[in-house]
Image: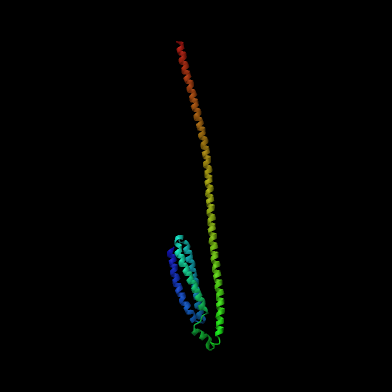
């Protein structure tokens, strides 16, 4: 699992380096070229978010005693991601002096206040957009947790059902064993009773035979 986490880390480092470079270029561009670069960076930021989610999932599979180190690393990556998002937001509303003069021409000084106002409005819109995106990600994460919780619950219910069936089968076997023991006990009791009866019968027959022999001897002596 740790090897997968480290692979995600390498991808994270490569992507963030590219994004940082592109964010630095955005204020120097204008028009369609700037729009395309902004869209490209936005797409790469989404890839970085997915990498962070994959890292988080990998950490859940790591033994608890080893998670601390990986959680600290993931936390630093999330902080780096937040910084990139802030830099990206600022770069989208920023212009280099060269581009600004090109856009405003000779009216640069008179339109400075309008540009500042435009920046503020765009910053406000970007803030709202960012909040909406964060809320959306939280909802997605909450939904994922709910789905995982439901799956865990279903597995627990399935295990409980299986355990209940095992317990029921064990009870049935115990009842069968108890019935067999009762039957065996009755058979043994009957056998013991017959053995005792046979012994009594043998004792009686022996006593009769002994008495007969004694009487025969007695009458035989008396006749002489």
Camera sees residue 23: yes
Camera sees residue 39: no
Q: Tell which of 221 and 128 is nearer to you.
A: 128
Placement of the N terminus among the 4 image quadrants: bottom left
Judging from the image, the colouring scheme is rainbow
**x, y (%) of residue 106?**
53, 89
**x, y (%) of residue 4?**
44, 65
Give the answer, above or below, for where 88 lies relative to 186. below
**x, y (%) of residue 218?**
46, 14
Placement of the C terminus among the 4 image quadrants: top left
Is 64 left, or right, of 114 in this rendering?
Answer: left
Give the answer, above or below, for where 159 lies relative to 224. below
Q: Tell which of 85 and 213 is nearer to you.
A: 85
Most extreme residue toward the top, as rendered? 224
**x, y (%) of residue 117?**
57, 81
Give the answer, above or below, for where 98 lies relative to 77. below
**Residue at the location (54% across, 85% down)?**
112
Most extreme residue toward the bottom, as rendered? 106
Q: Tell which of 144 and 60 is nearer to you.
A: 60
How many numbered marks have been drawn onto this rendered protein structure? 0
């Amino acid at each position: 699992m740790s090897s997968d986490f480290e692979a995600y880390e390498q991808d994270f480092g490569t992507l963030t380096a590219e994004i940082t470079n592109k964010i630095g270029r955005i204020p120097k561009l204008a028009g369609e070229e700037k729009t395309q670069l902004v869209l490209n960076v936005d797409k790469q930021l989404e890839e970085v978010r997915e990498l962070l989610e994959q890292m988080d999932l990998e950490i859940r599979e790591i033994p608890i005693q080893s998670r601390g180190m990986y959680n600290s690393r993931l936390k630093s990556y999330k902080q780096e991601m937040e910084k990139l998002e802030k830099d990206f937001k600022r770069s989208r509303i920023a212009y280099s002096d060269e581009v600004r003069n090109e856009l405003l021409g000779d009216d640069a000084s008179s339109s400075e206040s309008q540009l500042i106002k435009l920046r503020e409005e765009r910053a406000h819109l970007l803030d709202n957009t960012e909040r909406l995106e964060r809320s959306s990600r939280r909802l997605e994460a909450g939904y994922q947790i709910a789905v995982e919780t439901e799956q865990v619950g279903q597995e627990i219910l399935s295990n409980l059902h299986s355990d209940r069936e095992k317990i029921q089968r064990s009870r049935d076997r115990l009842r069968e064993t108890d019935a067999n023991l009762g039957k065996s006990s009755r058979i043994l009791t009957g056998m013991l009773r017959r053995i005792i009866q046979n012994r009594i019968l043998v004792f009686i027959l022996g006593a009769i035979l002994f008495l007969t022999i004694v009487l025969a001897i007695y009458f035989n002596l008396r006749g002489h």
